[in-house]
Image: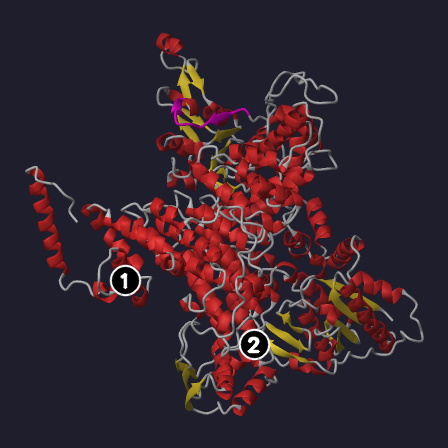
Amino acid sequence: MPVTFIGVRHHSPACARLVAATIDELRPAYVLIEGPADLNERIGELLLGHELPVAVFSSYRDGERRHGSWAPFCAYSPEWVALTHGRAAGAELRFIDLPAWHPAFAGRSNRYADAELRYAEVMERLCRSFDVDNVDVLWDHLFEVAPADGSAERLAVYFDLVRGESAAGEADTAREAYMARWVRAAAAAAGDRPVVVVTGGFHRPALVSALALPAGDGAGGPAWPEVPALPAEAVGGSFLVPYSFRRLDAFDGYQSGMPSPGYYQELWESGPEAAARHLTESVAARLRERRQPVSTADLIAARTTAAGLATVRGHRHPARTDVLDGLASALVNEALDVALPWANRGTLRTGSHPVVVEMVAALSGTRVGRLHPATPAPPLVHHVNAELERLGLDGADELDLDLTVPADRARSQVLHRVRVLAVPGFRRDAGPSTGLDPVLRERWSMRPDPARLTAFIEAGAYGATLADACAAVLAERATQAGRDVDLLAGVLFDAALSGTAQVSEQALADIEATVAAAPELGALGRMLAVVLTMWRHDRILGTAHSATLGTVIVAAVRRVLWLAEGVHGQSAAADLGRIGALAACRDALRYARRQLGLDLPGALEVAARLAADGGAPPDLRGAAFGLRWALQQTSSPDPGASPANAADGQGEPALGAPAAAPSTDPPDPVRAVRGAFQPDSAGDWLAGLFALAREEVLHTPAVVGLLDELVSAMAADDFLIAVPALRQAFEFFPPREREQIAGRLLERRGLAGTGRSLLRGVGDPELVAAGMLLDDRVDAVLRREGLTGGTRD
Amino acid sequence: MSPTRRVSAAGPATPGPGSVVEVTEPADRVQRPPAEVRYADELARLREADTAARPPGWVLSVQAARRFVVGDSKLGISRKFVGDPSLIDRALITLATSRGLMLVGEPGTAKSLLSELLAAAVSGDSTLTIQGGAATTEDQIRYSWNYALLVADGPSPRSLVPAPLLRGMAEGRTVRFEEITRCPLEVQDCLLSPLSDRVLAIPELTGPEAMVFARDGFSIIATANTRDRGVNDMSSALKRRFNFETVFPIADLATELALVEAEAAALLRRSGVTAEPRRDVLEVLVTTFRELRTGETARGDSMDRLSAVMSTAEAVSVAHAVGLRGWFLRGEPGTAEDLVSCLAGTAAKDNPEDLAKLRRYLAQQVTWRGGEQWQALHNARHLLPG
């Protein structure tokens, strides 16, 4: 029973070539392939004649766990070659690995990630002893550009070395035990005809030694192992979806396989020399297309360097990194901000040099797969059609939905999910556009579109149900948001509209990262205000107290406080955006502190430092002071205190007695106002204060009196300078409260009349200005003539 | 640059309990011999074992030169540069082609050390060095005259005083140009024709001596630090003649920590401190340096970078200072409090804004980590001046 084991690296052209040659030569009875055994019945589907890359997408959902993973195939995947050549040689084809839903794959989204990379320390030692940057370089060096003869032995030695130094994890052991049973069964069934086993190289040593063991004739006998059935309460399945090189290249960290599919496709088709040439050409073409200068001299230099590097590194033809290094040497004429991405494995980082960006794009390739028309459609298509039909959304129609009615709400959610998947033919004409507006109706128009089916098939790669696919797309968008908080806010709102409450941990981490890197206070504040409102009240969209939004709030409060302390510029005018950010922060601390465990003492400390920082802009200092005042004074928040909780009806946890008073002294508003009252900045400072502590100001007569005193004491010129900013500051009081203040001023001076009449203002400001000018002139004349006696009031 | 043997002779006469350690001078009395002297035996071993073809004019093959820098345990060659080996490959290949090699990067990333090592490996000599500066003139780069002879004999090869560039070309050796962007633009440009035409004209002479043609083995390694970008940028003509290699700070925490620990411990021993630096304090120190340098914390918050240089070399000197403080003030290893005091001197060197950034970092970005030393660092934030 001759069994030939080929340990491969997934997506390696060199391994694919070896697999092809071995199968063609041996013409085995069985070809066993690392892949989901539950797909064995349907291997024919894979061989229908698709345009590669395609992937087997597997989904799984039970009470506790939901999981989606892909097994991507491209033309040069050893597994794919095993399928096609095995079929051509007339062999029986079998996938022999556990199904993707099996707990052994928990947390993994790429079946064909390289197992050995999970044992990073070994690989690092190996790279160190070869003095290369990383595993990919080492792999190219040992296999991809090395001559093909003897590659089987080299592969075996390589993987024995890797495996010999690391104990496999529990999940890998379980899979290997299962695969070994298949091998044993196939060996028995084949008799003396050959069997070829194609698995990840990391597993090969274990399988070889498992076969060498005397089979326990009873239990582990040569019967074909049964395929584990889905647990009764779970739903899931595997199906074919179109895939793309871009997604193949986007796996990161332990999930990643071989990078640069565009390059390896070329290597597979036409060999290392042509691949190197093609890479240089496509980089040059891309750069020239973007009007980056690439001279002939540069190309000669790149070529020379690549050839030189290849010689030094012992390659007959330039390998991937030889070409890349050559191009980088010749084309990058300045200091880089970020290290070359092929030196340290990983996806492209922001700040990469434009030349490098184009190089990586050329490596990635743009190929997109397409399924053969006869392929059974992914379950998403059936699921969506059933859903749309169930809710009566499948025809051409105009809809007017009332979001407060549960049935309409359900239809709206489905429509939003379809919209998130970018399926043509569904348009929302009106409806809520942010989390703050009280719009409760939505209007949709729907019409049939020929591209609809294609869009659903493509979206099928994201999940088996509408909700899963929508969540996956939103997670991808959250990842792509980068540092753009507005984009992120859009994603969160879409998530709310489509009823996507659960997001993956990865997506949550990405969202946190976006917030943690947000560069601007204003945008962050706007988002925090919206998210906080959604978190606190949104019963309609069902986002109240959602864990995702809670995470966003925690991260945003932290970031607002951090950014606020970094703003400098004493003379900067009031910026409503950053004042709003601190106000949102105040609301978060006031209403969500207990539940989300926000750090109030820390925030108060930041506010105290900020309020006292002479280098900070006045509006921010005022706002910081207001933040302290509002949070320390308020012992039980008045439900009408802030506009944000107008709709609140559920009795938020009160702040209670000021908890754990920070080490700073309690704020003294009178002193602070007096200290901050400089003519050119008073208005800005007050704008910050009023925005954050409007209630407190209103209920502290001493402060109102002091303001009156200070404003009255201003010289006319100073007053003119201060008045626009003061006016802006008092805008923060709604008319009724302004009236209260006015009334109090009249009272203070012992004058009769109502606040309203005082506020009514004057008809013609020009007339007033002319009058004031006249007054000033009279004063000047009087002074000149020595006639000033009493005061001017 | 790696820390040199400079010893700050601070501290009282009786440094705490235990033995009193005298600061002794090395026997050869040279503070820092050039690389080819320091590693003479390694170079000799490499030359002996070197069978590969050598580029014309080189004393070692490319492979052997590479081993000299990245190390080779079989031949007992130490690893002298921590970084991607591919950088060394590219640098060496560049030197073998007709372009110059430009090493750029933040200060303190060992660019000069790397240039010295490369020159020692390629030419066996790293001393043909031009130090760039605002006052550097063409005379110091190309050649000048012995004026007594010039007046007596007129211009002749005898009265010519060759500077590093002329010597490098005539003798086929590697010329190092340190801090090239600190030179005025027009002075930099005198490298143009040596780099492209490989010839240097001496118009004062006549006959065949008026042109010096570069011999095999001539190449230029320039260094520039990115903080000087904009002080004197390079002309694009000159940029085209150089291949740029960016040298990055050490990418990985463990490697940097190990390096700082080793170097700081050595410096402390030399300063007479018998207490080993505490690893947890060093870890806090190195992490702080890395985060302030990259402007990103371990959990992903982005911050403003400090304008001060937070290089590994600075980390070593701060670790040294921390150890000295702890030992000579209290007779124990340095603590997080010492670290805060020393950081103020490094980070706020010339810039109150950096001090503010540092204060903000210590106040807001430190406590979430947990860990005793981080907490101590946070609590000691009031020790920052101002």
Please give the residue where the numbered disc 1 appears in the rendered image. Answer: A743
Picture quadrant where residue B152 is located? top left
Q: Callout 2: residue from which chain? A: A
The image position of residue A744, as x and y in percent, is 29, 60
Residue at the spot 51% in from the left edge and 79% down from the top edge: A417
State the SS at label 1.
helix
How packed is label 2: few (under 14 Cα within 10 Å), some, or many (20 or more)? Answer: many
Residue B325: x and y in percent read 62, 28
Among numbered discs 1 and 2, the one appearing first in the sequence: 2
| B325 w.r.t. A432: above or below | above
* SS at circle 2: helix
Left/right of residue B351 with respect to residue A713 in the rendered view: right
Would you say A694 lies left or right of A194 here?
left
Left of A173 or right of it: where is B12? left
Question: Front-most of A435 and A657?
Answer: A657
Residue neighbourhood size for the residue with mark 1, other residues' Cα within 10 Å, grouped as few (<14), some (14–19), many (≥20): many
Whole-percent x and y of residue A272?
Answer: 60, 57
The residue that mark 2 highlights is A469
Q: Range of the magenta residues?
A: B127-139
Magenta span dominant secondary structure: loop
Name the subunit of mark 1: A
Q: Are marks 1 and 2 on the same chain?
A: yes
Residue for point 62% across, 21% down: B11
How far apart marks 1 and 2 lie (CA) works out to 60 Å
The amino acid pointed to by label 2 is Ala
The amino acid sitting under disc 1 is Gly
| B133 falls in the magenta region | yes
